[in-house]
Image: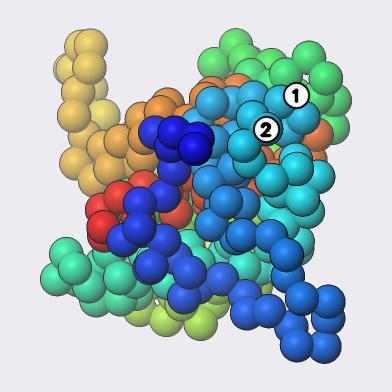
Amino acid sequence: MFKSYPSDLTSEQWELLSTLLPQENPACRPRCVDLRAVMNAIFYILCAGCAWRMLPHDFPNWQTVYYYFRKWRLDGTWDKMNHKLQQWVRVCEEREPNPSAAIIDCQSIESGTTVSQDVGFDSGKLVKGRKRHFLVDTLGLVLMVVVTSAYESDQAGARKLFAKASKQISHRLTRLVCIWVDAGYQGEGFMKWVMDTYRWILEVVRRPTAAKGFVLLPRRWVVERSFGWFNWCRRLSKDYEILPQTHETFVQVAMIRLMLKRLA
């Protein structure tokens, strides 16, 4: 009998998550793998930061685990799970299921030595790697994430983020009106483009000119806290993924695990 890992799902968490997983297709060969074990293996990869081939032997074969991880990325299962859990968390916090306000920010992270696609240098942060662009609600829950080269500017990444959000989750953002941003997104042309294209209002939260050292800025601290949550996931401490889309999926998996811990 194997002992459980700290990253394993509890019975209550699995009861919630199992209702969101795709049902077995009766036209296909019967499923012979335990999806709970698959989810535990994916959470282990996320928390431990190890390679797929280094999964402990008490999990299903790493090829099987990676198959489901990739399949659910391509068919949108991770996105659907993330969205449904967000609604449950927001309702538990006595909020509307869909947000009316959000915050956008980005974070530059180093990439692994084997990563070469979409890698650049952020001259402002002096980081060679990639940049994660986040759109979060007022609770810090990630609504959308886009990973680009670190060379791309904040506004260029925001354009990709807004385009992806309007294409994939526009029906979830019907109440969205205001988005708080930092000074990197200011500019009359960009703010007018956002308003004309998506009908969203960008409100810049500026740092006080006389302030020195760390300052807790209204609204913007929420997304900074979300950055801190990802520090508990070693797989997200650097960008080890060949494809930027894989890193985006691991961000969704991290949020799913965090929300499950809140709900159960």
Considering depth in this image, is 49 or 188 the residue closer to the camera? 49
Q: The residue under label 2 is which amino acid type?
A: His
**Distance in Å between CA atoms under marks 2 and 1:** 37 Å
Q: Residues within 10 Å of mark 2 (few under 14, many from 20)?
A: few
Residue 121 is left or right of residue 96, and the answer is: right
Quadrant into which the C terminus falls: bottom left
Disc 1 marks a residue whose amino acid type is Gly
- Please tell me whether residue 199 is drawn above or below residue 70 in the rendered image: below
Disc 2 or disc 1, which is closer to the eye?
2
Q: Which mark is residue 120?
A: 1
Q: Secondary structure at mark 2?
A: loop
Q: Residue 24 appears at what percent x and percent y? A: 68, 79
Asked if residue 240 can be seen in this view, the reply is: no
Quarter of the image holding residue 122?
Answer: top right
| Residue 249 falls left or right of residue 112 | left
Q: Residue at x 85, y 25 (%)?
A: 116
Q: Which residue was labeled with disc 2?
A: 57
